[in-house]
Amino acid sequence: FGSSRFGSRGGSSRPQVVAANPLSFLTPPAFCRMAAAANAGKRKATSVDTLPPICGGALVTSIVMYPADVVRAICMSNPGTGAGAALKGFLEAHGVMGFVKQGLVAEVTRASISRAIKFFMQPIVHKGLYGKPETQGTAVSKGLAGAIGTVPEVIAISPLENIKLAAQLDKEGKFSGSADIAKHILKTRGFSGLMIGYAGMQVRQCLWTGGFFLTLDVYKGGVASVVSNKLAQDVLSGFAAGATGTALNCWTDVCRSVVQKKALADTFDPAIPRPSMMEPLNPGPFFGTASEIMAAKGITGLYSGVGPKMVHLGGSGAILAVLMPRFKSMWFDMMGLY
């Protein structure tokens, strides 16, 4: 791996040994040839090809985290209620099987669709905004792409969000299931009733998703300096990114839960006129509720239920950070994609 060169200096010839780079054969063209050989027989993946592993990871996360979401919903729609009291009240009203009967289908469907759209749209939006893959983006560009990509997500999940919340808060057993809830809302409020609380949900999703994608790689870099195990890195950084998103959006979840709870309760009072079809887009009730809670209970009121929410969304972030890249790698290998 060495070579001798001779030159003259001051009239004398002296050998000069120059070490050759042992990897000099890996020139850019050689790298390209090696990559082409590794991908021989494989098809370049499209955005659609990422949907199956994304949906799989989203479904697993939604099922695992459902009990935490039930407690979170009760705490946030009743500011001041602790996690212990919320769990005790739920079990007294519905028993352990309540976790299965009270909105499980609606919540798992909603959360799976939400997370699938979130992770599907973020790289697409990033490519559209910046002209390059999100893997080549900055923390800010990834976070912004994630936040913007939540618009179709919230439109898709709003009906299921309302059905789920109505089921979880149904202590009197007024509804026999998700279909019964949907029928009641459509009868009393029309299609716009399924979009109750849209404005608050849009703010909530923008803040959490933007915060998650903004900080995930930052946390990964920090964790990697102290933890060598890759799985542990993903768990810790995913939880931290999810918790950061929660710190940003917790107050929005409290406010929109209160708004939705009141709006759903109003559907049982015939004396209350049907709101305008554009009412779900009105941010007034959302920010008005935020002001009322702040005035009455201070910042702690706005962050009611932050503990269960940290567990719910921090845990969700950890599971997603672990499953998404691994499911994608397994799926691509199985389908011959690169």
Image (spheres, rainbow, N blue to C red):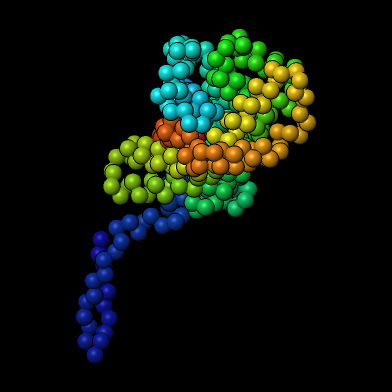
Q: Residue furthest front?
A: 296
Examine the rendering and report whether any part of residue 63 can be seen: yes
Q: Is residue 251 above or below residue 21?
A: above
Picture quadrant where residue 280 is located:
top right
* Side of 201 where 248 appears, left or right: left
Report the label total. Answer: 0
In front: 200, or 118? Answer: 200
* Side of 153 where 229 appears, left or right: left
Q: Is residue 256 above or below residue 2?
A: above
Where residue 234 sits in the image (x, y, percent)?
38, 39
Q: Which residue occupies 63% across, 48% down?
A: 128
Q: Which residue occupies 33% across, 56% down?
A: 23
Q: Which residue occupies 45% across, 47% down?
A: 215
Where residue 11 sits in the image (x, y, percent)?
24, 90
Where residue 187 sits in the image (x, y, percent)?
75, 17
* Side of 231 where 279 appears, left or right: right
Picture quadrant where residue 289 is located:
top right
* Side of 279 where 317 appears, left or right: left
Q: Is residue 89 above or below residue 249?
A: above
In front: 9, or 294? Answer: 294
Where residue 327 sits in the image (x, y, percent)?
45, 30
Picture quadrant where residue 121 is located:
top right
Q: Residue furthest bottom?
A: 10
Q: Which residue occupies 78% across, 24% down?
A: 273
Examine the rendering and report whether any part of residue 334 can be seen: no
Q: Quadrant of the N terminus?
A: bottom left
In front: 221, or 274? Answer: 274
